[in-house]
Image: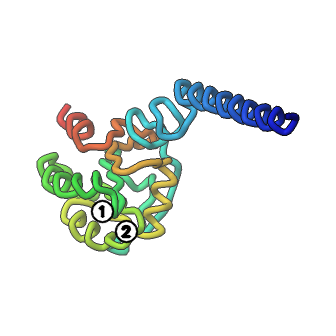
Amino acid sequence: MSLMGAAVALVGAIALLNLTLTYGLIRRFRAGAVPGTPGGPGDGHGAGTAPTAQDFTVVTTQGRTVGRSDLPDGVLVAFFSTGCPPCAALLPRFVAAVPGLGLPAPAVLAVVAPGAEDGEYARALEQVATVVTGEDAAVVAEAFGVVGYPVVCRLASDGTVTGAEHELVAPAAAAAS
């Protein structure tokens, strides 16, 4: 009988612990303290970036060295990851839409996270943007605080990230105004 009582007490304790942890997790989500949730760390106004990009220096696929301070005010920055279905869907739309924005390639920075198909992404994006791939892409993503893909945003000369979204819509609208 005491073994049965101990088993019931153990199950009850585990259930109480589970309930407490679930309650705490729900509170964190509601407070926005979980990365990638609205208002949480790394939430750049709708998508997964920090509000300010840190300094960085990387080498582009064309062999040029580029740093945050080299980018023009209002530069369009897009982050892609290979193997990401939303990124694969955005890629052709992005390549088609950028020329309509009237931005030269130096005013558009495309960052492709390291992956098996990053060369294919880079070739497509080089038509309309300055492209960063490989470990340099990881450096830029870290500087922007990227926590999810795809992300399209604008970068002010002071490093402020604006209009961060998972689509080209918001930055394109910002360019038109």
Q: Split into 4 quadrants, where in the image is the N terminus?
A: top right
Identify which residue, 118 or 96, lies in the foreground.
Answer: 118
Task: Measuring from the top left, give residue 86's x and y in whole percent.
Answer: 28, 51
Colour logic: rainbow
Q: Point out which mark residue 18 bears.
A: none
Within the image, what quadrant is residue 134 found in? bottom left
Q: Residues within 10 Å of mark 1 (few under 14, many from 20)?
A: many
Distance from Cα at disc 1 to Cα at disc 2:
7 Å
Task: Determine whether label 1 and label 2 are within 8 Å by CB.
Answer: yes
Identify the residue position indicated by label 2 in the image.
Answer: 60
Identify the residue position indicated by label 1 in the image.
Answer: 130
Callout 1, which amino acid? Thr
Question: In this rendering, is residue 1 above or below 92?
Answer: above
Within the image, what quadrant is residue 17 found in? top right
Callout 2, which amino acid? Thr
In percent of the image, x 41 and y 40: which residue is there?
A: 161
Question: Which element is circle 2 on?
Answer: loop
Task: Measuring from the top left, give residue 116's x and y in whole percent.
Answer: 36, 73
Mark sitting earlier along the chain (1/2): 2
Q: Split into 4 quadrants, where in the image is the C terminus?
A: top left
Task: Measuring from the top left, give residue 76's x and y in whole percent.
Answer: 30, 48
